[in-house]
Structures are given as C-alpha cells and as structure tokens.
Image (cartoon, coloured by chain):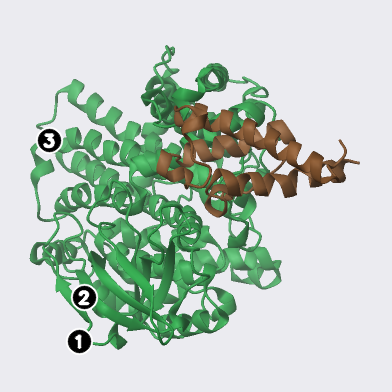
Amino acid sequence: MVTRPATGGPAALAEAPAPQQREAAVQARVAELEALLGDPTDPGNPCGYHAVLNADRAAVPFTRGEALLDDFGMNREFVPSRLGGRLDSIDTLVRVMRPVFRRDVGLGMSYGMMSYMAASDVWMAGSDEQQEWLAGSMLRGAKAAIAQHETAHSNQLVRSQVAARRADGGGFLLSGGKPVINNLARSEALVLFCRTDPAPGSRSHSVLLLNPGELPVDRSRIVPHQMPVGLRGNAFAGLEFDDCPVPESALLGPVGSGIETALRSFQISRTVIAATALAAVDTSLRTAVRFDHEHRGGGWAGARSDAQRTDAAATGAFVNLLLYDSLALVAMRAIHLLPTQTSVYSAALKYLLPRILTETMYDLSIVLGAGFYTREGTLGIFQKHVRDVPVLSLGHAGSVACQATVIPQLHRLARQSWFVEDDAPAGLFRPRAELPPLHTESLSLACGRDSLSASLLSVAAAIPGRSPVEKALRGLAGQLVEEFRDLRDRVLALEPADRTTPVGPASFALMDRYALLLAASAVLGVWRHNQDGSDPFLADPAWAAAALHRIARRLGAKVPDLPGECETRLRHEVHVRFSAQRSYDLYNTPIPG
Amino acid sequence: MTAPTTRHSAVLADNLHRGWLLDRLALYLNRPADSIDPTVPLAEFGMDSVAALSLCGDLEDQFGLYVEPTLLWDHPTVESLVGYMAVEIPRVGEDNR
C-alpha cells in the first residue's frame, strides 16, 4: 500500500484553519507545476527528458522549460509575500522547485536559483526602495544575477575581484572584473560584491545593486565565457570594469557589510540548493528502477545474484535520499525555527551533497550497467544529472568552505552545548507543519548551540523496541550516541595549536563525523515526531534503522546486520512508489512519471 | 566584581587584559607574544575565523563577556580589542550586581 499523507477534499478545505489552507495551497501549486511539466519520460512531451537532453546537447538554455516556468509564474516564488510574491517559507520554495530539478538541474539553477540567490541578499540587506524595485522587476519576469567576493582558494565562479573606490563627486568608481556570472547578459539586476577597502579583514567588502543594462558602455564590458561540462545550457558571461562610475544609491547595506551579508545569505542559499538538488537524484533512482523493470521482465535477467545486487543498490539509494532529506528538512525548517543555529546545519547539509547525492548516483550506475553511458532517451537523463549535480558544489559552498564554517565552532559546541542542550522543537522534524515567519536578521554567523544533536540523545533513550526492526533501531541509535560522545571527547582533546592556525587535518575529519551524526539526529527526530500516523511509512522504524545503519557504517562502527524485514519493507516501498508515481523523498508527493 | 573607577585601576585593568589577550593570541598564532604588534591587524599574523571564534569563546569563559562572532572584524588589532574590553568588561560586573 502506498502511504498517502492525509489531505482533506475541497469542502473540508474551506472550513480548515489558516495553516491547513496554506499547506493545501502549497500542495496544489506543486501539483499544478508537476502537471504542467508533464510526464518527463514521454518522448513527445516538449518539457520531457528528450527535449531537456536536446537543449543540453546544443548547450543552449532550455527555452521551452523557461517559457513554461514563466507561464507558471515561478518568479513569484522568489519574492516575499510582503512585496507581492509568494515566498514566505524556505521549505515551500524548495518543494516548488523540486519538480524543476527533477527534470533539469541546469534549468533549475539558471531559471530559479541564480535569481533567488541574488534577490535573497536584497531582501536581507536592501533599502525599501531597492527591495521594491527588484520585486517589481522580478514580478514582471526579469532575472537577477549575482557576482560574489573572491575567496582565498577560489574557483572560477568566485575568482578575481572588483574594486570600488570613492569617486570625487560621490558614488564609486569600479575597476577589475568577474569572469563567470550566470545570466549576466539577460538580467535586470546584478548583485555585485566588491572590495571597498584594500586592508585585510572582513570589513573590506561591500555589496552593490546595479542594473547591468544601465552601466556606461564605454566603462564596462561583457565578456563571453567558454562552455562548461555541467550546466551546459546556462548563460555564463564575464564582466569587466574600467573606472566605471556607479551612484552612491547602488550600495546594498552599509559600506563594509559585504562579508556579513554573504555569510548570512549562504545559510539560506546552501540549504535551498542542497535541499532542492535531491530531486535530481530522485530521478536517477527512478530511472534505474525503470531500467531494471524493463530489462528484468525480458527473460534474460535470470541470474538471481544480479537481481539482488540491483535491489540492494536501489534500496540503498532510497535510504540515502531519506537520510539526506531528513537533514535537508531540518536545515530548511531551522532557518525559521532556530535561526541562530542554522549556520552549522546548512553547512553540514551542503557538505554532504557530494558525499551522499553524487555518490548515490554512482552507486545506482551498477543497475544501469553499460546503459550508464547512454546520452539519449529516458536513460540519458541519468548521465546528465551525473554531470550537473556536482557543479552545485562549486561557487561559494564547496566542501571545504562548508567545513570551514563548522570547524571554528566545534570546540565551543563540544564544551557548552553537546550533551547539555535542550531538545529541538518537534516542528523541526514535521514535513508539513506550519512555520513561523522568516527573520533573516536572526541568522547568526556562529552561536555555540546545537539543539539537533540533543534530539539524538533524547530519541535514542526512548525507543521502545516493540519489534525486531525497532530493537535494531534502538541498538543503532545507542551506538551513534557513543560515537557522538567519542566525537566530543576528541574535539575537547584537541590542543589549541591543533584547532587553530593552521587548522590541523584532524579537525576536518571530526567535522565529517559531526555532519554524519547530525544527519543521524535528523533521521531519529523525523521518525520520532511523525508517529501520529499521518504518514505510516515515516512512522515505521524500517527506514530509520536502515538510515542509521548506513551512517554507522560510514563512521566505521561495527554494526550487526539489519533484520531481513527491514530490507523487504524498503524494497517494497521503492517499487510501490515507482508504480504509484510518488516521489522518493520525505514528502511522498504524487508525480506524473 | 567592582568596576574600576579611578584612572589608576583602569590602567591596571588594561594591562591585565592586554597580558591575557596576548597570551591567548600567542597560542593561537603560534608566535611569541612580544612579536605581535598591537597596532597591526591580527589578520596579518594569520588570525583566521577559527582563532577568532576561539577567542570569542575565551572572552566568555574568562570574563563572562558574550560577544558577536564579528568582534574581530570591528576590532582587528590588539589595541582596539583592549579598548573594547576596557568598556565592556566592567559592564558585565554591573549587570551581575
């Protein structure tokens, strides 16, 4: 049986309280978008995989997809409701963007995420006038672009810098350039990070909000960029300045606030992109299951060991998606519920993107065999996602950048929060529960507190063990508590010289373990706080036990085999969701194929 | 704790803070305390976010002073930090009385 989350019909809805009406409206929007985008495996669908792959081969923007998103009014999702849009919660944004990422990561990034990342800085730091201007422009369908500051060890997306010096008559003169800006040539707004002070330190950068179309043509130049391997259809270009004048009113926030704006903004953008990316790997799993169904029925796949291997690969991938989505859910909801603690959760999630999502795609490739190399037909989407998903780890949220966000906080967390912090609120773990409004000013760069890991301890201590699977879950949770205790001891044992300049390799390994333990905490929290029966699958201990089993093995713990019914339950769910056309994530959403 | 009120005690407190601060920084930057020029931004001696946040934690442990993680952005030198401590640490005492 497919486990369908309970939702009322239209009659029930009119009398439902406001939070339920809001939730129903979100579900309706997701369903509308899925229906508009249609069955992606249908070769005649102008927005299906066939069309997506044709655009990718030609390395052009996927115009049919963009036109469809224009018609849907996707830009409204990026503009706060107070400014006339529909953005009021991060988790809604992710749920509405997942249908796009399911089909085409490139479209999702170029159409949506780039504009959202740029706009997010404006919603956070802009004046009323700047916010209204950008909201107006985006609600008319225009795009926004962003050029971020350079890091010490940069990649092309963040390399090189723009310097802004005070002009005699007021305003700034820009010089320098940025080689890779997504959508530059077709954006009405550009959020540009630039250096306003040559001194070292974190108060030397500022942010400007510009209209690239209004830059003086004799002082600025758009430079074409070579084609990348992933996100081939994205319109990258560079921008160069030669003493280019911009007015004082272009400043976004105070002079010197650039790094602070960026570090706050990253907490949202890392979470949104990492959480949405899951939908691409949902497609990878679905594609592998479809391939397996089509070929196993043909009579030639008689070898039993092969069937076992492909089943194990598919259930393993499903478990990875669920454990990753548990942390994604927590990170998204923490932005609303625990904004001061979000820096750690968003960085841990983005850090795990290549470790879990990219790896899952490669694990699934054994199901496809040589089909992995196919670039056409329905199977071709698998290859495209393999090229596109890793690109999401570039920019300002590479693995090391995410580790560098967490490592400085480890010691303080170990000393004053771990094992003493109060439990996280239950709402952190409930996929469709109402969220309080977003207060981006509460996002903190570091706070020394972690309520999520407190849930690992409290849930682990109260697992009843009513069935063999639940007993297994209890045992695994207990082992992970010991791993967490060991992590705390190791962090506290670091000598000051090991944990500061330069950071020793031990800190990177400890951060890796911490990220996995946070994922385990999220899994346990989601299982524990969804026992009300609205989703029987989430209430079942099978997925949680399998998820903790994978995490414990990644941590190198010796774990007993799971009870056989655990694997059976999950294998069954993989095939049922495939046949019933439901998503492979915590939301279990209906999809058209 | 009583806040230093006379000029004499303020100078004493500053020296105490400076000595404590330089000891911590010497540890984090892995260099002798007397090689840290109090007027040069600490970033030039290799002070990074790890050391900066560690120092924020130390201020909390030692003086009960809760500081923003951006403390060193706005007070990038030893001189500036000592000035900050001279103002803020007595306030902790006042709040606790």
Q: Report how far apart the C-alphas of labels 2 and 3 lie in the structure.
A: 32 Å
From where the camera sits, is residue A1 visible?
A: no
| Residue in view at x 20 percent, y 86 percent | A218
| Residue in view at x 23 percent, y 83 percent | A219
Label 1 sits on residue: A218
Q: Are there few (<14), some (14-19), or many (20+) residues within 10 Å of tag 2?
A: some
Q: Which chain is green?
A: A
* Viewer-side residue, B26 vs A372: B26
Chain that bears disc 2 = A
Image quarter in which the C terminus of chain B is found: top right
Q: Amino acid at mark 2?
A: Thr
| SS type, badge 2 | helix
Q: Which mark is residue A369?
A: 3
| Residue in view at x 44 percent, y 13 percent | A559
Q: Which chain is brown?
A: B
Residue A475's x, y, as percent? Answer: 55, 16
Chain that bears disc 3 = A
Q: Report how far apart the C-alphas of labels 1 and 3 lie in the structure.
A: 55 Å
Residue B58's x, y, as percent? Answer: 63, 33
Q: Are marks 1 and 3 on the same chain?
A: yes
Residue A235's x, y, as percent? Answer: 20, 70
Q: Are there few (<14), some (14-19), or many (20+) residues within 10 Å of tag 3?
A: few
Is there CB contact under 8 Å for labels 1 and 3? no
Image quarter in which the N terminus of chain B is found: top right
Q: Earlier in the sequence, mark 2 or mark 1?
A: 2
Q: Report how far apart the C-alphas of labels 2 and 1 lie in the structure.
A: 31 Å
Q: Earlier in the sequence, mark 1 or mark 3?
A: 1
Give the left or right position of residue A508, taking residue A346 as reference.
Answer: left
Residue A416, placed above or below residue A15: above
* Viewer-side residue, A103 vs A179: A179
From where the camera sits, is residue A511 visible?
A: yes
